[in-house]
Image: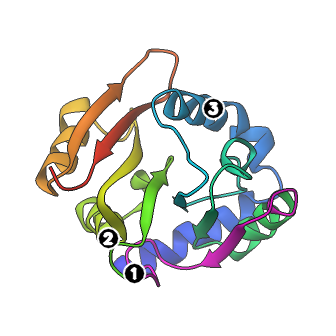
Amino acid sequence: MTFMRKREVMRHYDRLADIYDAQYGDEQRAKIRASLELVDIWSSDLVLDVGCGTGLLFERVGGSAKILVGLDISRKILRRAKTRARRFGGVSLIQADADHMPFPDSTFDKVFAITLLQNMPDVEKTVKEMVRVSKPDATLVITGLKKSFSVEGFLEVLFRVGLEVLSLNADEGLKGYVAVCRVGA
């Protein structure tokens, strides 16, 4: 079932690639703005954007971090991200499954997952994988769509994997919860 669900998600985003920014860009940018109000990106940071989509985070982080890696399961949506990434140095793109990321343990200083979890068959497994690739004391920014998660259910997943939630933005103007977390709590 997991493979079939992921293949379905990949095909869905392949179909959306050409219209994604027009359909969801404003909503995504609002979540990114809310995230970056609470997280500083340093020139020494290795940053991972899990489920990067068309690379909207690159507009705000590209050029600030030492390295920015965008990871997504959809090849077609990564083509859109590649166009956006060309404007910034130090951006790499990888097509991969968020549950099996091709990185060593403790690689990244900052990990973002904006509007990813609702697509994952085992949310806890996905968050554990993000923790695995994060350095000790790394910052993770994870969002959960309000239509997919109650605030309690969203926080429960984060706590179960051992994350310390530093901040939660549940502003009515956002369609998702924005959690800023720390590894190693």
Query: Mark 2 Cα within 10 Å, few/some/many (few <14, many 20+)?
Result: some
Name the residue beneath numbered marker 1.
100
The answer to whether residue 50 shows anywhere in this view is no
Q: Residues within 10 Å of mark 3 (few under 14, many from 20)?
A: some
* Helix, strand or loop: magenta stretch: loop
**Res 38 seen here:** yes
Q: Mark 2 falls on what kind of element?
A: helix
Kind of residue at badge 2: Glu
Mark 3 and mark 1 lie on one chain; the one further toward the N terminus is: 3
Where disc 3 sits, the SS reads helix
**Residue 73, above or below 24:** below
| Lower position in the chain sequence, tag 2 or tag 1 | 1
Residue displayed at 50% across by 24% down? 174
The label nearer to you, 3 versus 1, is 1
Which residue does the image show at 45% across and 15% down from the upper left? Answer: 172
Report the residue marked by disc 3.
27
Task: Measure how far apart labels 3 and 1 are at the Cα level.
Answer: 27 Å
Question: Vertical placement of 79 versus 124: above or below?
Answer: below
Which amino acid type corresponds to the residue marked 1 in the rendered image? His
Q: Quadrant of residue 170?
A: top left
Q: Residue 67: give x, y in percent of width and height.
A: 63, 65
| Residue furthest front in the image | 44
Relative side of 38 to 180, left or right: right
Please name the residue shown 47% across and 52% down the image.
Answer: 113
Q: Callout 1: few (<14), some (14-19), or many (20+) C-alpha neighbours within 10 Å?
A: few
* Residue at numbered disc 2: 129
In 3D space, how far apart are the residues under numbered discs 2 and 1 (Cα atoms)?
7 Å
Instruction: Residue 92: say if magenta.
Output: yes
Q: CA distance from mark 2 to mark 3?
A: 26 Å
Q: Are marks 2 and 1 in contact (CB under 8 Å)?
A: yes
Q: Nearer the viewer, residue 53 or 17?
A: 53
| Magenta-tinted stretch | 85-103
